Amino acid sequence: MSGESYAGVLVPTTALQLHARTTDANRATAPWSLGGWMVGNACPGNRVLTCTPYSGWIGTQVALDFRFGHGMISEQLYAKINAACEGQWGTFDAPSKECAELLEDPVRPCLNEAGDTYGMGGGYFLYDTCDPDLMALDPATNRPYAIDGGKGKAPPSQGQQQPQRRRQLLAVDGSGGSGSSSSSSSDAGFMPNSGAYACGQEKGAQDWLNLEAVRSAIHVKTKAQSGRDFHFSTSLNYSFTAHTLLPQYKETLLPNYRVTQFSGDADPCVPYVGTQRWIESLGYDKVDTWHPWRVNGGVAGYVQTYAINNFSFVTVRDAGHMAPRYKPQQTMYMFQQFLKNQPL
């Protein structure tokens, strides 16, 4: 299994259900034969320190440290906040008035200095060049803006940042080897391994999913049947059964399954800093040192492996909340290595 974000709840709880129902008679048969899973930028509960949108003040220190580590706030403010908030981190309730006023917001601390990450890649990627509109379409073509070998054009907000150019495309084979080919004039400029994606994907996908023929084909109510359009932003109505899955990780999941947690290191929504800290809190010995992993000779991120079933924490360099979207080549190699049970 694999997933990202809220899959940090869905994947482990599914594994727990399978584990509870696995017997000697069925353990060789799917899905009872589950061997492990990967989850990315994952939130294993609503009161785990890294799930900043949902964890109240518990996650504020992680959000603060993430911003400081990315050069978004000054040393002076960082030191002032830490002095005012000393001994008050990691609680769901609000800290003292002085601490809270300096932080400004539990989810997006230091707004005046750091800026609002909700306006940076929708809060999912600090360096997104589609900012501020992730759903922009070119009005001349009603298609996503493209940056290719001179055929497409960048939206005004991108034009001065990212010149039009023909991209050199790299491929990764199953062994981590590489090859290259130049994009032709017919390329859209956003091949799956180019390290870029076209603005307008959400808008295009939402329009597509509102077509009556599409809704009928995927067996959901059409607009005529439901009386409403599809929107990506919806409420979740469910009953909480646990605020954190960390005890289940320690007691059941990691002793029985091979797990990799990975994080795009430029994601302000579920910062890698918090994932690293909750993993460390489990207290497992390390089998190696924190070190870079590479794809085609370039650093793709960093990895730490622990002494229980090859449990690994992996960062994906310069990737946001949906790591495969921003670094498809690197994450494909990471998935391949996981499936082969080979180290990065």
Image: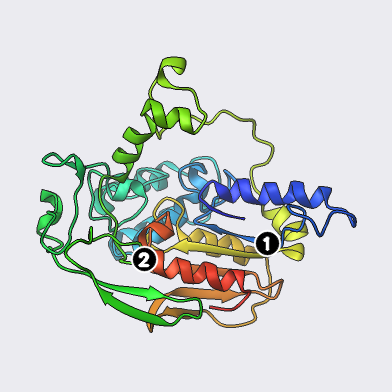
Q: Amino acid at mark 1?
A: Gly
- Say which element carries label 2: helix
Q: Nearer the viewer, residue 157 or 79?
A: 157
Q: Nearer the viewer, residue 257 or 76?
A: 257
Q: Which residue was labeled with disc 1?
A: 36
Question: In the rendering, at what x and y percent does residue 94 appear?
Answer: 49, 40
Q: Which residue was labeled with disc 2?
A: 69
Q: Residue furthest right?
A: 24
Distance Cα–Cα, label 2 vs label 1: 32 Å
Mark 2 / mark 1, whichever is N-terminal: 1
Question: In the rendering, at what x and y percent does residue 150 appear?
Answer: 10, 61
Q: What crowding class fits label 1: few (fewer than 14 Cα within 10 Å), some (14-19), or many (20 or more)?
A: many
Residue 79 visible somewhere in the drawing: no
- Which of the 4 image quadrants contains residue 201? top left
- Which of the 4 image quadrants contains residue 122? top left
> Is the residue 126 above or below the residue 308 in the image?
above
Q: Amino acid at mark 2?
A: Gly
Judge left or right: residue 181 versus residue 336: left
Judge left or right: residue 262 versus residue 154: right
Judge left or right: residue 216 versus residue 123: right
Residue 260 visible somewhere in the drawing: yes
